[in-house]
Amino acid sequence: MRTVIVNAAVILPDRVIPRGGLVVEEGRILHLFEGRAPAAVPGDRTIDAKGLYVSPGFVDIHTHGAGNADFMDGSVEAVKTVCRTHLGFGTTSIVPSTLTSTNEELFANLAHIESAAKTAEGMPEILGVHLEGPYFSPEQKGAQDPRYLRNPDPGEYARLLEACPSIVRWTVAPELPGALEMGRWLRKKRIVASIGHSNAVFEEVERACANGYTLVTHLFNGMSRLVRKKAIMYLGVAESALLLEELDVEIIADGKHLPPSLLKLIYKCKGPDKICLITDSIRAAGLDVKESVLGSLANGQRVEIEDGVAYMPDRSSFGGSIATSNRLVRTMAQQAAVPLPEAVRMMSLTPARVMGVSDRKGSLERGKEADIVAFDGDIDVRLVMTRGRIQVDRL
């Protein structure tokens, strides 16, 4: 059976078809059209989008939790809860992220994520796992537990990949001893090596790029910035990422972690083809709560929710993002004045390209998987499809 979506404002990577639609068959996009729909075929299912925007499904390559669950909670059901919550906000592909922890806890949670990935119904596709840590700079640890920070160990990271072959990206501070060797190893394994929680200066970032690092984790958060040492100015990771064209960046575009002025600067420097929007969300995402926990329930830290973001109780710093994917698109379009097709591209095609799946995901094109989101002018999600199956219907 074909599914025909009509009366839609179809978002392409570079423009919007103001009145058109698309045809889906066997889980893939058969073709797009402008104006009137093609002649019906017996058995067609027609969906009237009622003038809503229709876009590719959102691809979130960095998230820790949602729906009062976290990927470090220690159960398959927690993994499914996070994924299903994000699905309701338009995320059709997801990369679960871990936190620095004991190896025992990490190995167990990697197994739970891999087990949950076998479930397709009612879930975004799990593209693989993102390891955030434990090879971080203590000076830029952020909310990572300092007890478990250490330098890269070839024996250890090889064992982790052996235990969890679905690791697809790894965030590392590249100035640490052994980090450049690890970058080359990750490149050989076709795992995205990302710079994050790092105190590196420009020259160290340059060396990282030459040794396999291609992405910067949550730009401007958890990293060095311009610093003066004995009268000499050095670029930090943040400025280096803006300068070096070969680096892609991800940003928490909730309007809180980065103010609109900084979002505009990053967009001006890097452009939509080098920026991935990420939620980096904790378990409070998708909920209306005043308090939550950053990390697992067993070992996490209490945070307070106020004005759309989590704070540490003493207000010394943020305690995590509570954003969902549609909010990121809304922020870029409404607060950073980014054209909607480009805001969507940063939440779909660019992260799909970074994760190596843009041949099948990330844009509405003939032959690609029918991961589709429909939303209104305020980017409130009304319909979600994964591979042609309706998962969320609020039309």
Image: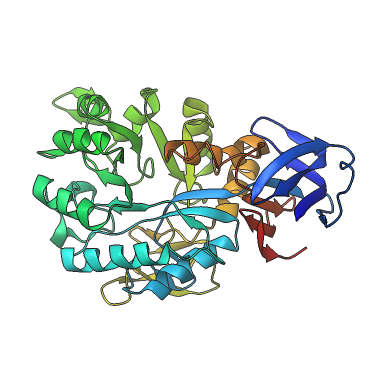
Residue at screen point 38% across, 45% down: 218
In the rendered image, residue 21, in percent from the top left (x then y), is placed at 79, 43
Question: Which residue appears farthest toward the bottom when viewing the image?
Answer: 298
Query: Residue drawn at (21%, 61%), measured in percent from left and top?
Result: 145
Q: In this view, does 248 lie above or below 165?
A: above
Where does residue 108 sit, x and y in percent of width and height?
Answer: 25, 68
Q: In the drawing, does residue 308 fall left or right of residue 101?
A: right
Residue ranking furthest to the front: 42
Q: Which residue is drawn at 82% across and 55% down?
A: 44
Is residue 307 in view from this perspective?
Answer: no
Question: What is the quadrant of the N terminus in the image?
Answer: bottom right
In the rendered image, the vertical position of residue 41 relative to residue 367, given as above or below: below
Q: Looking at the picture, does residue 242 appear above or below residue 176?
A: above
| The C terminus - image quarter | bottom right
26 and 387: which one is in front? 26
Which quadrant of the figure has residue 223? top left
Q: Please indicate, yes or no, whether residue 89 appears anywhere in the rendered image.
A: yes
Instruction: Determine whether 327 is above or below 239 in the image.
Output: below
Q: Nearer the viewer, residue 195 or 337?
A: 195
Near-viewer residue (44 or 20) = 44
In the rendered image, residue 256, in percent from the top left (x then y), is placed at: 48, 52
In the displayed structure, does residue 184 sit left or right of residue 318?
A: left
Q: Position of residue 288 (x, y in %)?
A: 55, 72
Name which quarter of the figure residue 235 lies in. Answer: top left
